[in-house]
Each structure stands twice: as structure tokens, then as C-alpha cells.
């Protein structure tokens, strides 16, 4: 059974009953028609739910004219959106302008033409319905967009956590080595210093009556301890501790520079610092098997979101390491080359960062999907499939561009273009 369309309601306002009858007879076949003989009655009917879909309003009425009725209807939130058409004997251009300025959609002069009235009523009701539908759709789209943004934020957070997982593994591995070195050196230094202090203590307790004999005894003790070698060993241990502390400080600086993932404000930063801090975090993955070549150009600082850019560098460099490890033959070292340069362009100069690897390369089929969310060639559990998609989004947020060139078997080059100011 097909549902009949619901008839729309039209309120006719006129102080002359004959005029109301004419309009009611003209419209009642297609619409539900209500009537009001004065402005006060019209306001009462219009403000009662369900409100009419349209009001046909006379201007010249006693007590409250049509202009005032229109003004009050537009002032109430419940009735402000109801389409109003003035139907009046006032034919002056100034009268029509006043009515339209008050918010009426149309102005029809008496005597009316039935076909014109029906056409205009139908057109304005359709337009109003379409407008309401569009507004409803816009509201739904805004809600959908809001949900999409929430989902995108969760995806970005997921990829961020994956990056932090790599970061955590790198920190644990990198800090563990210098800490173990520091512990071993500190123990060795403690033992060596004890022997040095034992010798010094002998000097503080020399028996003056047997001075020569005491010195000979201490000299023998020093020979037993290999005292000269012992002092050299102390110096070496101190140098080792210093090196370990420097390495730990370097890792700490790298972590501090890299892990600004949640900074919301743009900052003017040194791109090379961001790349270097990312390399520091990934050092445990490449230090024994991959050569890093830096061909840094003379580039100015860039206005950007530092943590987000570091996330891009992490994704690109981690993928480059993966590609090299996948291809690696025996002990042959892979190479990652990082180049930076300044390109002068109008209206905004840009910094170009290219990261090339000697890995497996990317097939044309995979290349087409490289920036698709959730696309990955890695085994289940080894990648989110979001790294490159999010990286592209981050670069686009900087009004930049990310490009990929690759040849299967030879490797890949990913190039990032960043305007100096965003």
C-alpha cells in the first residue's frame, strides 16, 4: 500500500471573508487551508504546533496590519522560518520593498491571477522544503564529518602509538648499552681507585725512623699493583664513563627532540635536528648493517608541527630499513641517503627532503596503493597500514607534497616538499 503524501498547511490571513473564500477554494484540493480574519488571530494560529507551512498575508487590516504581523512572526523562533507571501491591493513599489525587507518571500497584488497564485505558492513551498532538506542533510554531514574526524584522530593516535612502540624499543636498546658500559666501567674504576688509595694511604703512614725502608716497601707494593698501568687504566675508565654519559645524553636529546608528537602549535625548527633525532631513535636497527649518508644542504628553519614531521621521518626511515633488510645479501651493507635542499619558488620557497634506500623497491601495483589507509605488504601484526597514509595527511596539513619514485630491485626515493611558512 502506497502512503499518500501528507498535505501541507497554508494559513490565509485577510480581514475580508470573501477574499479568504477565494483563496481557500483555489488551494484546498492540494493543501490544508486555515484562515484568520485579523492579525491577532493569525499570530495565535501560526504559533500553535504544528505551525503552518506557508502564510498568505493581507497588508491592509484594522488594528494590526500585515507588516506588523510579518514583523512579529519573524521575531519568534517558532515562526521565523515560515514562508510568507503578501497578497494585497497595495501596488506601490515602496510597499512591495517594505514587505520583502521584513522577510516575505513574495508579493502578489490584487486582483489575483489563480494560476499565478498556485504557481508561486507551489514553487515557494518546494523551495522551502528543499532548503529544509538541505539543512537537514548538512547537519547529518556535519555529524558524519565529526565522526570521521574522531575516527581519523583515533587512527592517527594508533599510528602514533605504533611509532612510539618503535621509539620505546629504540630507547630501551640504545640506553641499555651505555648504561651497561657505565656500570661495568664504574665497578672497574671503583676497584682500581681502591688500589690507588691503598698506595696513597701507605704514604700517609710512613715510619720516619725507617723512611728508606718504608719507601722501598711502597715501591714494591706499587710494582705488585702495576701502579703505572693502574693509573692509565683509571684514566681509560674515566674516559669510558664520560663516553657512556655523552651517549646517554645524546639519546636523551634525541628523545626530547623526537617525542614532541602532541605539540599543537607550529614552531620554526631546524629540519636536520628532527631527522637526526629520528635516526638516533632508529640507530639500534641500522647501526650494524646500513650506512647513513647525509647530504644536508644550507636550508633555513621551517615553520611546522615538529612532532608530526618527526612521525613522517620515522615512517619513511623505518620503511627504508625494512626494505634494505628484506633485500640484504650476506654481509653487504645497505645505504640510506638523506638529502635536503632549498628550492626558490613563488610565492613561497620550499625545503625539499629526499630519503633514498637501496632496498627491494616497490612494484607499480603496490605504488598505486601506497598511500591508501590500511594498505600494507607486511605480515599481520607487523604494521598498521596507516604510516604512509598518515604521513601524506601530515604533509598536506603543511600545504606540502610527498612523492615516491621506485624501481624494483634498486630501491626507492621518497621526496617531501615543505613550504617555509604554512
Image (tube, rainbow, N blue to C red):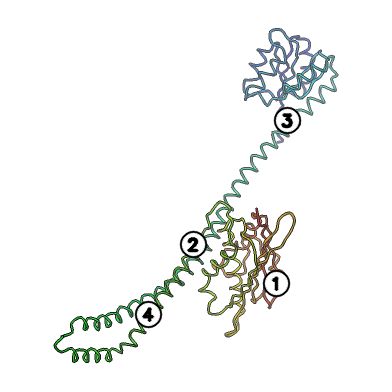
Residue at disc 4, secondary structure: helix
Q: Which mark is residue 406?
A: 1
272 or 395: nearer the viewer: 272
Does 279 sit left or right of 22 as displayed?
left
Could you tell me how far apart the alpha carbons at marks 1 and 4 are, in whole angstroms? 48 Å
Give the residue number, with chain letter if any, for mark 3.
128
Compared with 64, 294 (above or below) is below
Mark 2 vs 1, N-terminal side = 2
In the image shown, does 257 or 319 lie closer to the viewer? 257
Of badges 2 and 1, nearer the viewer stands: 2
Camera-side mark, 1 or 4? 4
Few, some or many residues within 10 Å of mark 2 (<14, 14–19, 20+): few
Which marked residue is nearer to the observer: mark 2 or mark 3?
2
Query: x%, y% of residue 319?
Result: 60, 70
Measure how far apart labels 3 and 1 are at the Cα level.
55 Å
Q: Looking at the image, tell me whether mark 3 or mark 4 is earlier in sequence order.
A: 3
Residue 39: image location, x then y, percent: 68, 13
Exactly how many numbered labels are in the figure? 4
Lower position in the chain sequence, tag 3 or tag 1: 3
Q: Is residue 73 left or right of residue 380?
A: right
Q: Which residue is mark 4?
A: 237
**Label 2 to label 1: alpha-carbon separation:** 33 Å
Would residue 334 appear left or right of 403 to someone viewing this image? left
The image quadrant of residue 59 is: top right
Considering the numbered disc 3 on the image, is that residue within a helix, a strand or a loop? Answer: helix
Query: Mark 1 vs mark 4: which is more N-terminal?
Result: 4
- Image quadrant of residue 352? bottom right
Q: Which mark is residue 256?
A: 2
Amino acid at each position: 500500500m502506497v502512503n499518500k503524501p501528507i498535505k501541507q498547511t497554508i494559513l490565509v490571513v485577510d480581514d475580508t471573508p470573501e477574499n479568504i473564500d477565494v483563496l481557500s477554494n483555489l488551494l484546498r484540493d492540494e493543501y490544508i487551508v486555515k484562515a484568520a480574519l485579523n492579525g491577532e488571530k493569525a499570530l495565535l494560529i501560526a504559533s500553535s504546533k504544528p505551525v503552518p507551512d506557508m502564510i498568505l498575508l493581507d497588508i491592509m487590516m484594522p488594528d494590526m496590519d500585515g507588516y506588523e504581523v510579518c514583523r512579529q512572526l519573524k521575531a519568534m523562533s517558532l515562526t521565523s522560518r515560515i514562508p510568507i507571501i503578501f497578497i494585497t491591493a497595495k501596488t506601490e513599489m515602496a510597499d512591495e520593498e517594505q514587505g520583502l525587507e521584513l522577510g516575505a518571500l513574495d508579493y502578489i497584488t490584487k486582483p489575483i491571477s489563480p494560476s499565478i497564485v498556485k504557481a508561486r505558492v507551489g514553487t515557494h513551498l518546494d523551495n522551502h522544503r528543499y532548503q529544509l532538506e538541505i539543512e537537514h542533510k548538512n547537519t547529518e554531514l556535519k555529524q558524519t564529518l565529526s565522526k570521521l574526524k574522531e575516527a581519523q584522530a583515533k587512527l592517527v593516535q594508533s599510528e602514533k602509538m605504533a611509532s612510539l612502540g618503535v621509539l620505546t624499543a629504540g630507547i630501551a636498546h640504545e640506553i641499555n648499552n651505555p648504561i651497561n658500559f657505565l656500570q661495568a666501567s664504574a665497578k672497574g674504576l671503583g676497584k682500581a681507585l681502591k688500589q690507588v688509595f691503598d698506595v696513597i694511604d701507605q704514604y700517609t703512614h710512613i715510619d720516619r725512623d725507617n723512611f728508606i725502608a718504608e719507601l722501598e716497601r711502597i715501591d714494591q707494593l706499587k710494582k705488585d699493583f702495576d701502579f703505572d698501568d693502574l693509573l692509565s687504566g683509571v684514566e681509560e675508565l674515566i674516559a669510558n664513563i664520560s663516553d657512556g654519559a655523552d651517549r646517554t645524553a645524546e639519546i636523551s636529546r634525541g628523545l626530547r627532540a623526537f617525542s614532541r608528537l602532541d605539540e599543537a602549535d607550529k614552531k620554526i625548527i631546524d629540519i636536520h635536528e628532527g631527522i637526526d633525532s629520528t635516526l638516533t631513535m632508529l640507530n639500534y636497527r641500522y647501526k650494524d648493517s646500513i650506512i647513513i649518508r647525509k647530504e644536508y644542504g644550507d636550508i633555513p628553519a621551517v615553520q611546522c608541527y615538529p612532532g608530526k614531521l618527526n612521525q613522517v621521518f620515522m615512517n619513511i626511515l623505518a620503511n627504508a630499513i625494512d626494505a634494505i633488510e628484506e633485500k640484504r645479501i650476506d654481509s653487504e651493507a645497505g645505504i640510506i641517503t638523506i638529502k635536503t635542499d632549498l628550492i626558490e619558488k613563488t610565492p613561497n620557497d620550499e625545503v625539499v627532503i629526499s630519503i633514498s634506500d637501496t632496498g627491494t623497491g616497490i612494484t607499480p601495483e603496490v605504488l598505486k596503493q601506497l598511500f591508501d589507509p590500511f594498505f600494507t605488504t607486511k605480515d599481520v601484526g607487523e604494521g598498521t597500514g596507516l604510516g604512509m597514509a598518515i604521513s601524506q595527511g601530515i604533509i598536506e596539513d603543511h600545504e606540502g607534497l610527498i612523492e615516491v619514485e621506485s624501481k624494483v630491485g634498486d630501491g626507492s626515493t621518497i621526496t617531501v616538499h615543505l613550504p617555509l611558512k604554512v
